[in-house]
Image (cartoon, grey):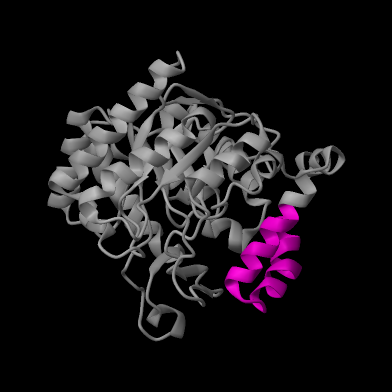
């Protein structure tokens, strides 16, 4: 099915506006997965036949591959992600306030490089409306994560309340929260990765998490931080020190980058974050550094440029426990999940590993 997508669907999508193509693909998945018969057909075609059971953050995953934030911002196709074989899905970014995001056009594709540049700006209906959609969707068969961002209208010194409010609203429906302080498309947001701003956000979110758990007589939800690939080593180490001192559960590495592979193609002259193949090595090197700096004690979710099983295995052996893709689905289609999981299974056997946990960080040892 991956080859069929590359031959037929990808050229058709390339003729469309990037954001419109994204919306249409999401609509098709939502409609198909809303019908039990079609859901069964999707599972038959796309669900991996191999199991790579993985445990992390107190959650169980059938394999380590999931959906990155940005693909399903509004929680529109929750049933669809399990139907195409993913082990978990991250919705959002979700902000406290509803917002339209940046002016269009704001998403651009470079097909030959398999790269995306976007400046979406956290366009989403706000956490109150997302809660309504999650309530209507009901329980899901895979863990659902939520990526939390800051509303554009919220001043930086009030950011902690913005994040904590969204967390509190979404808490009953979400299995894990990712605190996104690294998107390049909201003015000033990346300043929140540092110092008192970050400490205040983490502290406020932890307090909200603790209060929700007490009110619901349930365990606290895992909290992760998503970091930018453009940090200096000193900046990254400072964030890691704070995350560990605050008891944060893990790191998502990485968000999109402001760097460009060249300035020749018009797509790379657009403002915004770049993802896809140009980000692959940069994110892998950051994963490798995080794993070494924390001695493998802080779980890492690897994302950035995963287009095939080799890319996925590279992230895992560098130190990632779980992996995610966004641009990979744009350029490789829904068959990506099966290709990656089956490919990981083959590579593990060839390396003599009996479980994913044995492969994590093995390239560093």
The x and y percentages for residue 91 are 52, 46
For image coordinates 75% across by 56% down, the residue present is 28
Task: Give the quadrant of residue 83.
Answer: top right
Quadrant into which the C terminus falls: top left
Task: Say which quadrant the N terminus sits in.
Answer: bottom right
Please name whichever residue, 90 or 356, is drawn nearer the observer in this view of the structure: 90
Against 296, residue 115 (above or below) is: below
> Does residue 9 show up magenta in the picture?
yes
Left or right, 238 with respect to 143, comes to left
In the figure, is residue 337 to the left or right of 154? right
Q: Quadrant of residue 102?
A: bottom left
- Name the spot of residue 337 as percent of width and height, x first: 62, 45
Residue 283 place in picture, x, y as percent: 35, 54
Say whether residue 338 is magenta: no
Number of numbered discs visible in the structure rendering: 0
Q: Main secondary structure of the magenta part?
A: helix
Q: Is residue 331 left or right of residue 203?
A: right
Residue 320 shows up from this direction = no
Residue found 37% across the figure and 55% down from its top: 151
Q: Nearer the viewer, residue 361 or 90?
A: 90
Farthest-out residue, top: 217
In the image, residue 152 above or below residue 33: below
Q: Is residue 235 visible?
A: yes
Question: Residue 130 appears at what percent x and percent y?
Answer: 55, 45
Q: What span is colored magenta in the figure?
A: 1-29
């Amino acid at each position: 099915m991956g080859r069929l997508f590359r031959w037929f669907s990808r050229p058709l999508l390339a003729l469309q506006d990037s954001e419109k193509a994204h919306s249409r693909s999401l609509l098709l998945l939502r409609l198909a997965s809303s019908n039990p018969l079609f859901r069964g057909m999707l599972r038959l075609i796309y669900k991996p036949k191999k199991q790579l059971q993985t445990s992390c953050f107190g959650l169980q995953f059938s394999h380590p591959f999931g959906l990155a934030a940005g693909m399903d911002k509004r929680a529109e196709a929750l049933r669809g992600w399990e139907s195409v074989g993913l082990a978990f899905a991250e919705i959002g970014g979700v902000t406290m306030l509803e917002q339209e995001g940046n002016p269009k056009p704001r998403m651009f594709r470079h097909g030959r490089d398999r790269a995306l540049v976007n400046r979406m700006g956290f366009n989403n209906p706000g956490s109150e409306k997302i809660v309504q959609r999650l309530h209507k969707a009901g329980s899901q068969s895979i863990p659902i994560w939520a990526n939390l961002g800051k509303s554009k209208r919220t001043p930086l010194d009030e950011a902690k309340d913005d994040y904590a409010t969204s967390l509190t609203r979404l808490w009953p429906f979400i299995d894990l929260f990712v605190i996104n302080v690294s998107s390049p498309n909201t003015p000033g947001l990346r300043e929140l990765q540092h110092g008192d701003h970050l400490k205040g956000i983490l502290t406020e979110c932890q307090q909200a998490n603790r209060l929700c758990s007490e009110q619901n007589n349930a365990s606290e939800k895992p909290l992760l931080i998503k970091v930018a690939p453009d940090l200096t080593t000193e900046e990254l180490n400072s964030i890691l020190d704070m995350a560990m001192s605050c008891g944060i559960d893990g790191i998502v590495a990485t968000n999109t980058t402001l760097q460009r592979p060249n300035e020749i193609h018009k797509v790379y002259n657009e403002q915004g974050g770049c993802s896809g193949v140009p980000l692959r090595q940069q994110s892998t090197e950051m994963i490798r550094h995080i794993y070494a700096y924390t001695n493998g004690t802080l779980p890492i979710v690897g994302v950035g440029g995963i287009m095939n099983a080799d890319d996925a295995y590279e992230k895992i052996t560098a130190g990632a426990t779980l992996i995610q893709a966004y641009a990979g689905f744009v350029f490789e289609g829904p068959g990506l999940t099966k290709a990656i999981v089956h490919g990981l299974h083959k590579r593990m056997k060839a390396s003599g590993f009996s479980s994913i946990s044995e492969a994590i960080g093995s390239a560093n040892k």
